Image: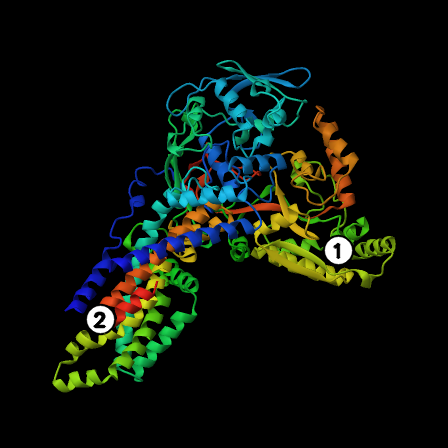
Amino acid sequence: MIVVAIKKLISVILTIFIVTTVTFLMMKAIPGDPFSEEQALPKEIHQALREHYGLEAPLSEQYLKYLSSVATWNFGPSFKHKDRTVNRIIREGFPISLVLGVESLALAVGAGILGGAISALNRNRWIDQTTLIICTLGVSIPNFAIATILQYLLAFKLELLPIARWGSFEQSILPAISLAMLPMAFTARLVRASMCKVLEEPYIKLAKAKGLSDWDIMFRHVLKNALLPLCGYLGQLTANILVGSFVIEKIFAIPGLGQWFVTSVMNRDYTAILGLSVFYSIILIGSVTFFDLIGFFLDPRGKSSRLSVSNSV
Amino acid sequence: MTIRFLFTLWLVLILATGCNPDPRDLGSDNFPQTVSVSLSGDLEAFDPRLVRSSYAVTLEHMLFEGLMRKNYAGRILPAIAESFVVSEDGCTYTFTLRSSVWSDGTPLTAHDFEYAWKSVLSPHFPAPNAYQLYVLKNGRAAKSGEVPLDDVGVKALDDHTLEVVLTTPTPYFLELTTTHFYSPVNRLWASELSEMGGGDPFSMLTNGPFMLSSWKLGDEISVVKNPRYWDNAHVRLDRVNFVITDDSTALQMFQRGKLDWVGSPLGFIPSDAVTTLKEQKKLIITPADGTHFFRVNTGSFPLNNVNIRKALAYAIDRKSIVNHVTQAGQPAATGLVPKHLGIQERPYFEDGNTPEAWSHFQEGLKELAISKDDIPPITLCYAQQERSHKIAQAVQHQWEKALGIKVILETCERSVLIDKLSHNNYQISMGSWFGDIADPINFLEVFKYKDTSTNHTLWENEEYISLLDNSSIETDPIVRRELLSKAEGIIISEMPLIPIYHATFNHLSRGLVGVYFSSLGYLDFTYAFKDFSKEE
């Protein structure tokens, strides 16, 4: 077990190192810098700013500086927003995205499992077909379109919910629903497919023959096995939702972390880009590992799957 | 059992994730004179020496006050400076400051002005606006480190007297002193900052009509009345909230009464809503000190020929663009400088005159000794934006129809476009200029030298340069106006840029009286108040 943990730790460090390097190379490769704008600065001022912020130093020197900022987890001030450090941006934006993300996830997973299970149990009947249609809509309609429609109908026209901003539970409802639609649909389809497969298994028939109640079969046998594939999907999904969605946050004026991922690239805000990329990779690695572990515990095959967990990163 | 537990947990999670009352609902009854304004993007900093974005200018005018200020009618009036005298040669200004204090009660002195301006010109301070202070004697030399800061032409003779020495008699100097580029900063506070400037905005001392009350990153900036402002008796607003939202969301919030001002200058009215709002007579359109134009790379074939450039310029039907594409009351432009700045008496050419465009085109072809079929497709590039795309398509159609030239449209990201411009790697590019000061020189200098960082057209003209230089030392305003007018005539006759339209500001507001909306693109709330009888 210790060996597995150490191996994991090494691979995490290696991943972060690669992410830092690739991000650095890509940042330097794209044209533009944090100080270029249409109402251009005089050349000597532009040059002075670049020198002041260390952008004229040789690339290797800049690279080492970035590596050390990752190692010490101190990314320095944002190039664009000079009054604040990247650490502060993450510290203030992430909790908001996190809360919204957890809410959406809970909604998506809960409703998705429920919908998928009901579908699987009533295969090919009308409730299954309806769920299929809703899921298809959820997957095809982009979340910003859903968000805009919901905002216009429920908040603006009917005034049932607040239009935008963050702070109260009512303000979180519409963004959470918009974010949850796609994962909910996907989860439902995934659970339905996997449950259908499990329901065909001989041991389910045996359990029924033994006389176990439907509820017992469901909760003791079917669900555990059906949810296994979901863990793989959830690892990736959780990371994406937790760090915030740029578009949803923009539409609902939520001061989360999501907007920073896009605006920092547009502004060529190097320190912010680096800090956010590394932060996101850590969240991603963390959530994938977490759901791998859950999958490991859910899997009744025990030992044989331990091998597969240690091989997956 | 586990599943039931998980289900309950799930329900609890959903409900628990945000059961707190909205703190913003508290208190607005106690402060009726509260205004909420939509803001498109967060500020980069609050230190006036570090900010350049147009949003920041409004905030800076609320938090800081310089030597002079502008009133309702755009007239320059004394602010921190009570009075001033100008020497005979027009190069030395001596300002007498009134007694005023910083937000912590300590006196504001001439030394604060001297410190602020010198720090901006220091080679070690990353001030992007340093070039605005180059009119000061030795300003440029100090920034490049050639002379010590003590040689710069600003000196506090005593606590209330500031002597400013300029390199040449600059007719627009007083205009410059109304900008935030010339703001004072408290030298004790500033000297404690790290080398990078910036720092905690809440510890920053300010002297303007308002002071910073709260700043939630990416969410909202709140300012309240500054009780220590020297003219505090005339400030009627208690609080101004700048709410950071997306433009469409801002419009919806305005229509539901959550915002009192939406649109320019701190945001935009969504382009699809502009026509409807105009028809409903709700949209307020005001002139802006800005011009939208196309930059032409005069080094790229066939645009190196002036008649080809003129042909392209004359073939555009600007009237139809402003009436059908932009639709926000923008005046068609035949010059570079906005007409209300007063140097253009009549249009420089006739808009949409396709026969004349055709004849210039023929002449250009003759001079280049080529035929129409030898003209390669011309690329028009611009930053991805809905309105730019519509304008580009309109112009592409007009050029193809009038001259038979094939036009390729190319969009790219804003920073990529700027990079292309700086390497002259383009043929025609969409661009604009919004003035820093309300003086024609600010527009004409954009194209002054071939290697001016804002030029990018590879065009330069000696007479143009000397006219601009002479205008900057000319004290007679009528003579100066003629010099500037002549300069504009030259640049239009050579057409390194093709003017399209002059900008306007569009906004919606409710119940506000006394807001000074400068054509430079900032709001001044000093003497504004909410008139509740005007609210719908």
Residue where numbered disc 1 is placed: B315
Nearer to the camera, B111 or A28: A28
Q: Nearer the observer, disc 2 or disc 1?
A: 2
Of the 4 image quadrants, the one containing the C terminus of chain A is bottom left
Residue farthest to the front? A3
Q: CA distance from mark 2 to mark 1?
A: 77 Å
Residue type, label 2:
Gly
Residue type, label 1:
Ala
Residue A144, placed above or below residue B119? below
Residue farthest to the left? A211
Residue A137 location, quadrant: bottom left
Residue B31: give x, y in percent of width and height. Answer: 33, 37
Residue A40 location, quadrant: top right
Residue B74: give x, y in percent of width and height. Answer: 57, 32
Residue where numbered disc 2 is placed: A302
Residue A90: give x, y in percent of width and height. Answer: 37, 47
Chain letter of the residue beneath label 2 in the structure image: A
Crowding at mark 1 (Cα within 10 Å: few <14, some 14-19, many 20+): many
Q: Which mark is residue A286?
A: none
Query: Which residue is pictured at 73% across the width and 61% down the height?
Result: B377
Residue B14, placed above or below residue B257? below
Residue A11: give x, y in percent of width and height. Answer: 36, 57
Check if mark 2 and mark 1 are on a common chain: no
Residue farthest to the top? B158
Query: Which residue is pictured at 34% across the width and 65% down the height?
Result: A312
